[in-house]
Amino acid sequence: MMVDDISVNPEEHYKPNTTYQFTNNEDLNDSRLANLKDATIYLNQQLNACGYHSPLDFNNNDEKSATKIVECISALLQQQQKDAAYREEMHDQHQKLQSDYELLTFTIKTLKTRAELSEREVDTLRAKLIKMDDQLQSESEKHRSTKDELIKTKANLQNVKSQAMHDIRKRETEYTRFKEKMQKLLNDKYHSTCGPQGVNLPRKQTIKNAHYAAPFISCDVDAPIVSCGFGHIEKNSEKIKQGDGDADAHPELASLKTPESYNYRAAHTQLPFELFAQNLEEEVKDILLALKFEWDNRPVGVIDDFQQKDDEIRQKDDEIRQKDDVILQKCDMVRQKDDLIRQKDEVIRQKDDEIQQRDDVILQKCDMIRQKDDMIRQKDDVIRQKDD
């Protein structure tokens, strides 16, 4: 059987495990031709699978078959070169992606470490915030208790002040009643003594001696009357000058009343000018002596009590002012702590935002790494298919 008689049928399949038995040289040649035919069929099948659809004919020695074989081999060599270049390029890209993957892995580890540190800082800040909240509550309780004490102190001071004013008004009322009583007694005494002294007036020297020997107002006898004060004497003198004879006389002195013709005012106005001036001078001296006696025997205890009350009120006002200052300081401290807590909250919020942003960046980079791994896997599959 000649080689030229071999025809290639694409539908036939190559059987590589087929065994042949050779009896002589003719059988050997026939087996070689059969093997060549099977090899040709197999090569055409592989070329058809790779995209080269026109089958090759290795048995014909014409120029067309040889040209086709050469073009096929040249195309295979070019494809092999392209595959080698593409494989090298893919290898470089794989190395680059591998380095990027390692860099991103290291970055992820660093970011995770920073995230853990940030979480620890956030926990520390939260613990500090809880502690500051407790301190703020305690300070608020102290502030409330101080405020309550201040309100109670103000109420007590108001009560003390009201009581002091009530005592002052009560003493003024008693003092006014006492003045009225003394004024009444003084008026009675003046009305009872003005008549006999104005009937027979002594001479100038006699009047002076009589005045110093037995003054018009005796300090020993009339001390309770003189202690009523300058106001009583002024009122009494005004009544005497006005000629008020309607006042009720003391029962014991009713018998000493003088008739209307011997009135004190009339006696003074009917005297000569020198005697009237001398008598007026003596009365002024008596009034000055009475004022001196009243000043020496003034009630010092009442004034001291009033001064003590004023001092106590002043001290209480100072204490209230100090309490107000302390409350203002506490309010400033509470306001500062509120500002610190607000700043800490903002810092914690910023840290949370940074952690969230870092987590988003890590997720994006993980997605990118996953996509690049998929691309590398696809390219490896393509290269593997081309190698096959």
Image: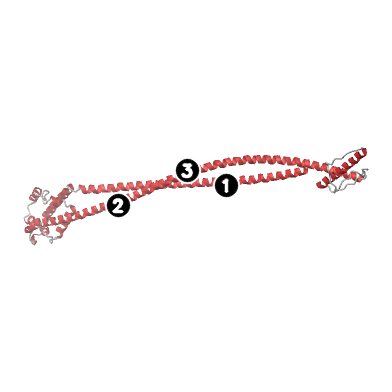
Total number of numbered labels? 3
SS of the residue at dot 1?
helix
Instruction: Answer above or below: position of 59 versus 183.
Output: above
What residue do we see at 52% from left, 42% from top?
121
Estimate the spatial distance between the alpha carbons at disc 2 and disc 3, rounded to whole Å: 44 Å
Could you tell me residue 242's position as x and y percent? 15, 60
Q: Earlier in the sequence, mark 2 or mark 3?
A: 3
Q: Tell me the number on the disc at residue 128.
A: 3
Residue 267 or 151: which is nearer the viewer?
A: 151
Could you tell me residue 87's position as x and y percent? 76, 41
Screen quadrant of the N terminus: top right
Could you tell me residue 118's position as x and y percent? 54, 42
SS of the residue at dot 3?
helix
Badge 2 crowding class, 10 Å Cα cut-off, few under 14, some 14 to 19, many 20 or more, is few
Q: Earlier in the sequence, mark 1 or mark 3?
A: 3
Residue 310 or 269: which is nearer the viewer?
A: 310
Could you tell me residue 30's position as x and y percent? 91, 41
Estimate the spatial distance between the alpha carbons at disc 1 and disc 2, rounded to whole Å: 61 Å
Which residue bears the numbered disc 2?
A: 158
Q: Earlier in the sequence, mark 1 or mark 2?
A: 2
Q: Amino acid at mark 2?
A: Gln
Q: Going by the image, does 106 lie left or right of 383? A: left
Q: Amino acid at mark 3?
A: Lys
Screen quadrant of the C terminus: top right
Closer to viewer: mark 1 or mark 2: 1
Badge 3 crowding class, 10 Å Cα cut-off, few under 14, some 14 to 19, many 20 or more, is some
SS of the residue at dot 2?
helix
Which residue bears the numbered disc 1?
A: 356
Q: Going by the image, does 319 lie left or right of 24? A: left
Residue 206 or 337: which is nearer the viewer?
A: 337
